[in-house]
Image (cartoon, grey):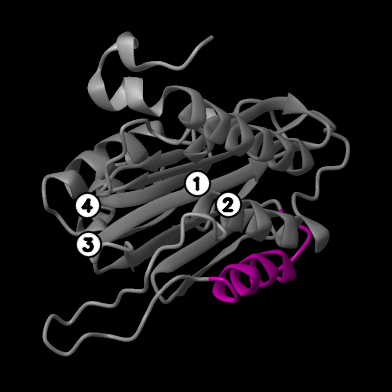
């Protein structure tokens, strides 16, 4: 009933600090997908779908946050899940990817693992949905050359460049243009995008956690909401960044 993408990116800020971020974007022809499917932290990203078992996302991410590899975490949870044949779950951590589709998922269903990302879906019009979403993300993925001294890859992060949340929405849009969820008899749909990073800010960017819970145009609405959240965030920082940094309203601009 869904297709989604999970990603990990390494990047370097302008002051030379290395960071890692994780994200999930998901859409379906049912309301409220953002309450059930995407799970993200500073150490991993998981999407659980088909016959949803929220436990796979919540406990899976908790295990990853405790240091367990995402494949080991999710395989262990699936082995203890009597409904595993009807589940679809995938995700990434700092080094590993994992994607599973039970044989009881409804056609068309499948998954794909790439370089630092996974995509998966079920009840789709066809494989082209996942291929398009993956290709759209790959074309904009942020990863630099591997540093031989550290074994990690990084590129400099430009605050005004395309943030991950925007690029994940673009990946959903690409998959949707190829047909997306095949159930046209269900017009009320939803979409969500969630991103977490090891980089700290005085104020968390609101465009990194957005949901459209019920609409007939979920991806267009999510994109519009994202654009408004970016504009509002910049306006807020211009007015109140000093107050947030000082933790004092005495530093706030005139209201």
User: In the image, which residues are magenta?
Assistant: 124-140
Along the polypeptide, which appears first: circle 2 or circle 1?
1
Assess disc 1: are there few (<14), some (14-19) or many (≥20) residues with their C-alpha within 10 Å of its C-alpha.
some
Find disc 1 in the rendering and name its residue: 86
Q: Earlier in the sequence, mark 1 or mark 3?
A: 3
Q: In the image, what residue occupies the spot 74% across and 38% down?
A: 224
The quadrant holding residue 235 is: top right
Q: Are marks 2 and 1 in contact (CB under 8 Å)?
A: yes
Query: Is 152 contained in the magenta span?
Result: no
Q: Are marks 4 and 2 in contact (CB under 8 Å)?
A: no
Q: Which mark is residue 120?
A: none
User: Dot 2 corresponds to which residue?
Assistant: 105
Q: Mark 4 highlights which residue?
A: 73
- Tell me the CA gap for discs 4 and 1: 18 Å
Residue at 53 percent of width and 62 percent of height: 119
Task: State how far apart marks 1 and 3 are (Cα).
Answer: 42 Å
Q: Is residue 100 left or right of residue 93?
A: right
Percent of width and height locating residue 1: 65, 43
Which of the two labelled residues, at mark 4 and mark 1, occupies the earlier sequence position? 4
**Distance CA(mark 4)–CA(mark 2):** 21 Å
- On the image, numbered disc 3 is attached to which residue? 17
First in sequence: mark 3 or mark 2? 3
Based on the picture, tell me whether residue 131 belongs to the magenta stretch: yes
- Mark 4 vs mark 1: give the one in front: 4
Q: Is residue 20 positioned above or below 81 on the image?
A: below
**Which residue is farthest bottom?**
148
- Quadrant containing the C terminus is top right
Q: Are marks 4 and 1 in contact (CB under 8 Å)?
A: no
- Cα distance between the residues tagged 2 and 1: 5 Å
SS class, disc 1 = helix
């Amino acid at each position: 009933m869904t297709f989604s993408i999970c990603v990990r990116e390494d990047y370097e800020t302008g002051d030379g600090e290395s960071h890692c971020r994780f994200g999930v974007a998901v859409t379906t022809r049912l309301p409220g997908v953002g309450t059930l499917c995407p799970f993200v932290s500073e150490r991993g990203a998981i999407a659980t779908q088909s016959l949803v078992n929220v436990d796979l996302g919540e406990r899976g991410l908790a295990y990853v946050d405790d240091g367990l590899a995402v494949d080991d975490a999710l395989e262990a949870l699936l082995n203890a899940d009597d409904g595993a044949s009807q589940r679809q779950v995938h995700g990434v951590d700092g080094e590993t990817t994992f994607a599973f589709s039970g044989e009881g998922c409804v056609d068309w269903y499948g998954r794909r693992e790439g370089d630092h990302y996974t995509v998966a879906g079920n009840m789709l019009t066809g494989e082209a949905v996942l291929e398009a979403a993956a290709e759209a993300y790959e074309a904009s993925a942020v990863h630099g050359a591997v540093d031989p001294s550290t074994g990690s890859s990084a590129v400099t992060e430009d605050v005004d460049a395309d943030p991950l949340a925007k690029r994940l929405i673009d990946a959903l849009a690409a998959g949707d243009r190829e047909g997306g969820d095949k159930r046209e008899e269900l017009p009320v749909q939803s979409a969500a995008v969630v991103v977490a990073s090891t980089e700290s800010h005085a104020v968390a960017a609101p465009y990194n956690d957005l949901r459209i819970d019920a609409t007939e145009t979920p991806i267009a609405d999510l994109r519009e909401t994202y654009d408004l959240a970016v504009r509002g965030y910049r306006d807020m920082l211009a007015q109140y960044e000093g107050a947030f940094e000082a933790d004092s309203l005495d530093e706030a601009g005139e209201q």
